[in-house]
Structure formats: structure tokens, C-alpha cells
Image: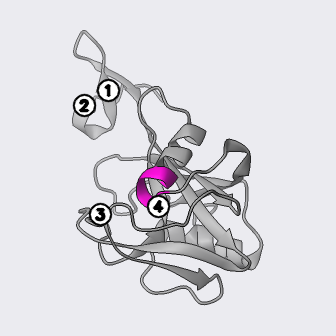
């Protein structure tokens, strides 16, 4: 999709040097779902400004400029949980393309979800200002509420039917 719709920089397009809209951009993020038997480690979000009071992947965050999604996943596990994860220990689960379901300003994201069953160290809340709790939950008995797009992935994981690509927030019949 090109920027010929006339949307400004705040509408999801990055302007080019002449001030006209450029290409549409999506924001990538990496999610690490630590697994232990049929359990997953979740954190209770606080003071982040996004979905505070919801349970979420224990380690997740945006991919930074010049960083691969695998490096981002490893960095987030280190920053948020104080553990080291090897690249080969990250099992690709699904990629989710999501948008705002309310028809608000264009904001689309591509989320890379990884499962991880092997790591070095004991997971702890390393960023106390951002997480109020950290607990293991059976996939069949998740807490409420869970961040909605993450709940979609966790539900598919519990059902054993995680597709390689998922959508969330789109009106198409293939969307979640």
C-alpha cells in the first residue's frame, strides 16, 4: 500500500523528504511465552499506559531499530525477567497482524509470538514499575482479564491449533 491516500504522518504513513506521505508502516513486536508442561508464565501489567490490570506474556516488547525479532525476544526476556534465552530455544508459534477494531486512526502491528521451554536463570519481575505480579497458569485455566490479542494466541495454543499467521481486529472473516 502506498501513501497516495493523503494521510499525514500521524495516520500511519511516514512522510518522505518532500513532505508527501510515504509508505505505510507497521510496528513489530516480539512476545516470549515461557512454557512449563501445560503452563505459561504471565505478568500482571501496571503503570504502562496500555492494558494495565491485564495479564500478558511475561516478556514482550517492540523491536528496536536495527534489531532482529529474535534479538528483541532475547532482550525482552533479559530486561523483563532477568533470564537468558538462546536463539535456538525460541520456537516460532505464530505471527499476528493486528489493527484497531474501532476504526480509529490507522495503527497496525505485526506481533511475533515465540514459545520457550529452556532458559538460564530464574524468571523474576525485573521491571517492578511495569508488573504487579508474575505467575504460572495452566493454559486451560488462564486468569482474567488477559490482553485480548494475546488471549487469542493463548486460546489457540490451549486448543493445539495455532495457525502460522493470525489476524486480530480486522473485519474480514479470517480475522480473529
As helix, strand or loop, the secondary structure at mark 4 comes to helix
Q: Nearer the viewer, residue 60 or 98?
A: 60
Is tag 3's residue or tag 4's residue first in the polypeptide sequence? 3
As helix, strand or loop, the secondary structure at mark 2 comes to helix
Does the CB distance between marks 2 and 1 fall below 8 Å? yes
Q: x%, y% of residue 72?
A: 51, 42
Q: Residues within 10 Å of mark 4 (few under 14, many from 20)?
A: many
As helix, strand or loop, the secondary structure at mark 1 comes to strand
Q: CA–CA distance between discs 3 and 4? A: 19 Å
Report the disc number at residue 9.
2
Q: CA–CA distance between discs 2 and 4? A: 35 Å
Q: Nearer the viewer, residue 118 or 176?
A: 118
Q: x%, y% of residue 96?
A: 57, 54
Residue at position x 45%, y 70% from top? 56
Is tag 2's residue or tag 1's residue first in the polypeptide sequence? 2
Quarter placement of the C terminus: bottom right
As helix, strand or loop, the secondary structure at mark 3 comes to loop
Q: Which residue is mark 1?
A: 14
Q: Residues within 10 Å of mark 2 (few under 14, many from 20)?
A: some
Is tag 4's residue or tag 1's residue first in the polypeptide sequence? 1
Q: Which residue is mark 3?
A: 50
Q: x%, y% of residue 135?
A: 50, 80
Residue stretch rendered in magenta on the structure: 77-82
Q: Nearer the viewer, residue 85 or 15?
A: 85
As drawn, is 144 to the left or to the right of 103?
right
Q: Which residue is mark 4?
A: 81
Q: From this view, report whether residue 22 is shown above or below residue 5.
A: above
Amino acid at each position: 500500500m502506498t501513501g497516495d491516500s493523503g494521510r499525514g504522518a500521524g495516520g500511519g504513513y511516514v512522510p518522505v523528504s518532500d513532505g508527501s506521505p510515504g509508505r505505510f508502516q507497521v510496528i513489530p513486536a516480539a512476545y516470549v511465552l515461557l512454557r512449563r508442561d501445560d503452563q505459561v508464565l504471565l505478568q500482571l501489567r501496571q503503570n504502562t499506559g496500555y492494558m494495565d490490570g491485564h495479564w500478558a506474556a511475561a516478556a514482550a516488547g517492540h523491536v528496536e531499530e536495527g534489531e532482529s525479532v529474535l534479538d528483541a525476544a532475547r532482550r525482552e526476556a533479559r530486561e523483563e525477567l532477568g533470564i537468558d534465552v538462546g536463539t535456538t530455544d525460541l520456537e516460532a508459534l505464530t505471527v499476528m497482524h493486528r489493527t484497531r477494531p474501532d476504526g480509529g486512526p490507522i495503527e497496525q502491528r505485526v506481533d511475533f509470538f515465540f514459545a520457550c521451554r529452556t532458559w538460564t536463570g530464574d524468571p523474576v519481575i525485573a521491571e517492578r514499575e511495569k508488573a504487579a505480579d508474575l505467575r504460572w497458569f495452566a493454559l486451560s485455566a488462564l486468569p482474567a482479564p488477559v490482553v485480548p490479542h494475546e488471549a487469542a494466541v493463548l486460546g489457540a495454543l490451549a486448543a493445539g491449533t495455532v495457525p502460522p499467521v493470525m489476524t486480530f481486529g480486522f473485519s474480514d472473516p479470517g480475522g480473529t
